[in-house]
Image (spheres, rainbow, N blue to C red):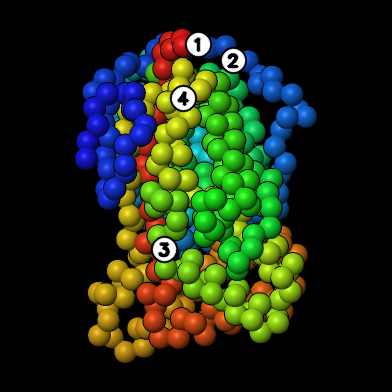
Amino acid sequence: MTYAGSDVTLGFALKGNIRLDASTTPCMSASSDTTQEDDINEDELCILTDLHMSSDYNSNSDCQSLGAATLVTFLRREAARIDASLAAEEALQVVEYGCATGGSSLVPLGAIQDSISDRPLRATMNDLPMNDWATLSSTVEPALPEIDFAYAKTSMYNPVSAEATVHLAYSCYAQQWLSGGAPTTLPHGALWANQLARDNEQRKVWEEKSRNDWERFLTLRAKEVLPGGSMVLHIQSSMCDGSLSEGAAVTLQEAKCRMLRDAELTEDEAASIVIPEYAKSPVEILDPLYFGPNARFWSVEELEYVRIPCPFMEEFGERCNEPLIVDEIIEKQMRALHAFMDSSLEDCGCKKETIKAFWAHVRAIVDTNPSSLSVDIMGTFIVLRRRVAAVHD
């Protein structure tokens, strides 16, 4: 399904794979040598959390790497377009939001570097202060020595760059994380609010928090990205009905419910064990880009909504006749889940023995069925263009 034009009317039913392309591509405007410091009041800065990926995240981020590889198609086009608009010798300024430990940054940054002329490339890597910055720098700097790296240790929901200094911004598998952690506890064994009914009151709080974060992100980036510049995002998404697509989410919820059943957790303890992510549907992503103040500053140039295949199940399919392959695939799946979930479980106040028991239940449920840990995640790939002139209401 294809839509033409930069303005998208919401109110259509989204089904299956969707692709949206804009028919116009405005040129990059000339950039100014002067910049301004962001004037957001310090009291308005979002609360920083201890959320971070584990130090072995690079070796357990197959899904993130697959998403980054898909993002490259969009990044190449935007990098080449912007490169053609810049003055000779002017540096291309790039920012990645939510870079983690850098394993999934190499392909996108390399693609940007390959898509531009012989000009300096400066990349600001942004993530929370508790990120493993030593692993990040030791990952990206030796692999991409011609790029001038800088590091912004703050939330992507805070100012990251000076105003009107960024040519190309991007993010992959990051925008689903909520600022300040989980806004409420969750009932019924849910780890994500998306596992609750749409009319559940706690879910509504998470939905509102996600919407506010997304609108704030767009507002901040509109200040930092130059008119004519681009923002290319891969946003981990829900199904169109707001539910989660991946089999792993069902298994993880079942493990939590079993702990409740076996009195290994009290109701209050179980309700506090949550992952501070909210997966937005395509409509929730597009809504502030059509209604409200952010629609004045951003045009939607492309959008693709797809189910991203589970890399573990694809590997299993290719090697299913090998001996011991089931245990090998399940071990990879378990390591990947540990890498992105353990810090959140610790932030919930879980004792080590509780976390250990949780993962033991997960492994027992999985048994010899790797499909019960599949991560065939819905993804929204969207290219936003910073309008050269704001559109007035």
- Circles 4, 1 touching at the beta carbon (< 8 Å): no
Q: Earlier in the sequence, mark 4 or mark 3?
A: 3
- Circles 4, 2 touching at the beta carbon (< 8 Å): no
Q: Is residue 247 visible?
A: yes
Mark 4 to mark 3 CA distance (whole Å): 30 Å
Q: Earlier in the sequence, mark 4 or mark 1?
A: 1
Please report the residue visible at 37 percent of the width from the left and 32 percent of the height from the top. Answer: 10
Q: Quadrant of residue 6?
A: top left
Q: Earlier in the sequence, mark 2 or mark 3?
A: 2
**Disc 1 crowd, CA 10 A, few/some/many (<14, 14-19, 20+):** few
Image-based side of 266 in relation to 393, left or right: right
Instruction: Indicate which disc residue 199 carries.
Output: none
- Circles 4, 3 touching at the beta carbon (< 8 Å): no
**Disc 3 crowd, CA 10 A, few/some/many (<14, 14-19, 20+):** many
The amino acid pointed to by label 2 is: Thr
Residue position for label 3: 246
Residue 184: give x, y in percent of width and height.
69, 53
Front one among 175 and 274: 274
